[in-house]
Image: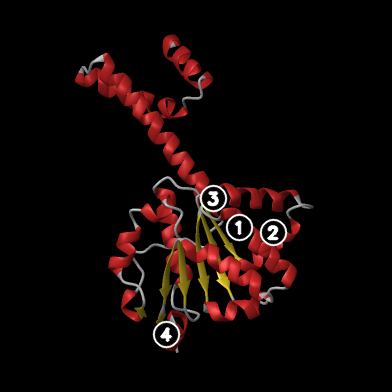
Amino acid sequence: MKKYQQTVSLLDNLKLKGIIHSLDNEITEAEEKKVSYLSFLSVLLNSEIAYRTDRRRKRNLAGAHFPVEKELDNFDFARLKGITKSDLASLMDFVWLDNHTNLLFFGPPGIGKTHLSIAIGMKAIQMGYTVCFERIATLIKLLKMADIQRSAGFRVNRLLKTDLIIIDEIGYTPIERKEANLFFNLISELYEKASVIITSNKKFDAWAEMMGDEIMTVAMLDRLLHHSRVFNLSGESFRIKKSTKEV
């Protein structure tokens, strides 16, 4: 038992917590099956890798700031036009993310744009990518406060270092010209360094009025569209449909 405690202490000093958690079971199984030393070592190292991968996934999920968790398995494609199961399946290899391609979802409220973006983001985290989710109203506040508030600065720095940034609900709230400039600067910083998922209820031709600066808006859209896949979605509002059924 003393040797066991010494071993655990050494593992703890080396911060090999995954091996510590699995050590008892692996020792018992190795003794029963009389596995080789090399096989035993391989099993322990793989358990450490699995432990660290799971911890990193949980940290990334917490850091993504998803308002809710969504999956593609329970998404109702039958009520939506503009994207198919085949389209989503093609996105699940995440080649577009490796190539810093953007996904732009346009359509009226209630059809599932946010659901799709969160589900894609959660799948990306499972595949080992880092993801951040921000509604545009929250994002603008963070950009305005980044230089004077530590927590806002931390969130913005995380955005600049992440693989995938989801910006939700563009078009629902007005954006002042100064705020639009901050948003443009962020998009410029992310250009060809990360992928962006945009959800918006306004098409491109309405963005200039929303941002208050046509030249800047054209420059921003140029960056967003240079490497992108655009999905113009339409269909019945899920929320209205659900409310109707309840009534």
Spatial distance from mark 3 to mark 4, Cα to Cα?
Answer: 31 Å
Instruction: Give me the disc on residue 127.
Output: none
Which residue position is annotated with label 4?
A: 241
Spatial distance from mark 4 to mark 2, Cα to Cα?
Answer: 34 Å
Q: Nearer the viewer, residue 184 or 196?
A: 184
Amino acid type, callout 4: Lys
Which residue position is annotated with label 1?
A: 188
Crowding around mark 1 (Cα neighbors within 10 Å: few <14, some 14 to 19, many 20+) is: some
Q: Do the residues labelled 3 and 1 touch (CB within 8 Å)?
A: no
Sequence-wise first label, 1 or 4: 1
Amino acid type, callout 2: Leu
Which residue position is annotated with label 3?
A: 62
Q: Of tags 4 and 2, which is closer to the observer?
A: 2
Residue drawn at point x = 45 percent, y = 47 percent: 129
Q: From this view, report whether residue 110 is shown above or below residue 185.
A: below
Q: Mark 1: which secondary structure?
A: helix
Spatial distance from mark 2 to mark 3, Cα to Cα?
Answer: 18 Å
Q: Are marks 1 and 4 in contact (CB under 8 Å)?
A: no
Q: From this view, report whether residue 233 is shown above or below residue 223.
A: below
Which residue position is annotated with label 2?
A: 142
